[in-house]
C-alpha cells in the first residue's frame, strides 16, 4: 500500500515538474520573442576629451564578412575648425588586419550610391589596425533609411567589407542632430 502511494506521489510530482517546465519555457519564449521584436535603441556615448570638453560619439562592434570584429566609431570634432568635422574610425583586433595608408574608404548605400571618404591617417596612423576617415563632406549624403556597406583595401591583399545596419545608421543620424543642435 505504501509503495502504491509512493508511486502515485512520484507520478504526480513528475507531472507537476513537467507542468512547471512547460510554463517556464512558454514564458521564456514569449519574453524572448517580445524583446527581439522591439526596435533597436540608439546609444550615444559621451566622454571627456579634456577637463572642460565633453564629446559625444557613436560606437558599435560589428563583424566583417570574414567574422572579424571591428569597433566602428563616429565622432565629431569641433576644435580643429569653426565647422564641425565628422570622423569614422575603424579599429580591428591587433595583429589580424592592417590598413594600407593612404587608402580611401568606399561607402555603398542601400540605394546603390557610392561615396568616397578620404583617409585621415595619410601620413601616419596610431597603430596598423586603425583607420580613420573624414566623413564631413558625406554626412548629409548618408541615407535616412536603409544600410551601408563599407569597403577598404587592407594589407596582404585583404579587403574589409563591413555592413553598417539600419540601427547604427540611425544612431549616426541621432549623433549629428545632437551635435548640430548645440
Image (tube, rainbow, N blue to C red):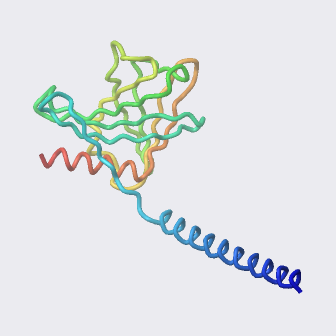
Q: Quadrant of residue 4?
A: bottom right
Residue 113 position in % (x across, y down):
41, 45
Residue extending furthest top? 123
Residue extending furthest front? 2
* Left or right of 101 on screen, residue 22: right
Q: Is residue 27 above or below residue 66?
A: below
Residue 57 position in % (x across, y down):
28, 39
Residue depicted at x 55% and y 23%: 96
Q: Is residue 116 above or below residue 36?
A: above
In front here: 118 or 94? 94
Residue depicted at x 21% and y 37%: 55
Residue depicted at x 59% and y 37%: 67
Q: Is residue 53 above or below residue 98?
A: below
Residue depicted at x 33% and y 54%: 144
Residue 141 position in % (x across, y down):
30, 45
Residue 107 position in % (x across, y down):
41, 38
Amino acid at each position: 500500500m505504501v509503495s502504491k502511494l509512493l508511486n502515485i506521489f512520484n507520478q504526480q510530482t513528475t507531472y507537476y515538474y513537467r507542468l512547471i517546465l512547460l510554463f517556464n519555457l512558454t514564458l521564456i519564449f514569449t519574453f524572448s520573442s517580445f524583446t527581439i521584436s522591439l526596435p533597436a535603441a540608439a546609444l550615444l556615448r559621451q566622454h571627456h576629451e579634456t577637463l572642460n570638453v565633453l564629446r559625444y560619439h557613436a560606437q558599435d562592434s560589428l563583424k566583417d564578412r570574414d567574422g572579424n570584429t571591428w569597433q566602428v566609431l563616429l565622432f565629431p570634432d569641433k576644435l580643429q575648425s569653426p565647422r564641425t568635422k565628422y570622423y569614422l574610425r575603424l579599429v580591428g583586433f591587433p595583429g589580424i588586419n592592417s590598413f594600407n595608408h593612404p587608402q580611401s574608404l568606399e561607402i555603398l548605400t542601400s540605394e546603390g550610391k557610392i561615396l568616397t571618404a578620404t583617409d585621415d591617417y595619410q601620413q601616419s596612423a596610431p597603430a596598423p589596425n586603425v583607420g580613420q576617415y573624414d566623413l564631413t563632406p558625406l554626412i548629409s549624403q548618408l541615407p535616412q533609411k536603409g544600410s551601408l556597406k563599407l569597403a577598404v583595401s587592407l594589407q596582404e591583399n585583404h579587403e574589409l567589407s563591413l555592413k553598417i545596419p539600419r540601427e547604427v545608421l540611425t544612431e549616426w543620424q541621432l549623433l549629428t542632430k545632437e551635435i548640430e543642435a548645440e
